[in-house]
Image (spheres, rainbow, N blue to C red):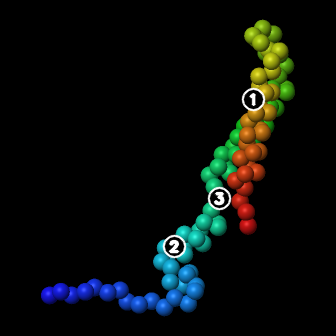
Amino acid sequence: MNAEITKPATKNHGDSTKNADPTEEQARARKGKMISIWFFVGCLLTAYGVLVLNAGLSDTGGGGREIAMANLHVQIWWGIGLLVIGLGYVARFRPRR
């Protein structure tokens, strides 16, 4: 009652993809086609940066009321910051062929 369990011998001709698990092959094939979520985050940050920068540049002064520290032009700085960060993400995580 001492039976040994042996694995069937597989022939390996130097090509690891032939004997690889089918799920591993599918994962490798999909990995080349997948787009990182960070690319889309970069696209959104870029779009928001353009919108905020445009709003900051077209600001007419607040409709006659005094705004504290208006001379800092916060919308312009936030727009530039979002634009730079978004373009950085887009450049870093862009899909490659």
Q: CA distance from mark 1 to mark 3?
A: 27 Å
Q: Residue at x 48, y 91 (%)?
A: 11
| Quarter of the N terminus within the rendering | bottom left
Q: Earlier in the sequence, mark 1 or mark 2?
A: 2
Nearer the camera: disc 3 or disc 2: 2
Q: What's the amino acid at mark 1?
A: Trp
Residue 38 versus residue 58 in the image, above or below:
below
The residue lying toward the viewer, choosing from 8 and 73, is 8
Residue 68 versus residue 45 in the image, above or below:
above
The residue lying toward the viewer, choosing from 11 and 80, is 11
Q: What's the amino acid at mark 2?
A: Glu
**Would you say 20 lies left or right of 32 here?**
left
**Would you say 10 lies left or right of 61 here?**
left
Q: Residue at x 32, y 87 (%)?
A: 6
For mark 3, give the secondary structure: loop
For mark 1, give the secondary structure: helix
The x and y percentages for residue 5 are 28, 85
Q: What's the amino acid at mark 3?
A: Ile
| Quarter of the C terminus within the rendering | bottom right
In the picture, residue 54 is in which quadrant? top right
Asked if marks 3 and 2 touch (Cβ < 8 Å), the reply is: no
Q: Residue at x 62, y 52 (%)?
A: 37
Residue 24 is marked as 2
Residue 78 is marked as 1
Answer whether residue 51 is visible to the viewer in this image: no
**Would you say 21 lies left or right of 33 here?**
left
Residue 35 is marked as 3
Q: Earlier in the sequence, mark 3 or mark 2?
A: 2
Q: CA distance from mark 1 to mark 2?
A: 44 Å
The x and y percentages for residue 59 are 82, 22
Q: Residue at x 37, y 89 (%)?
A: 8
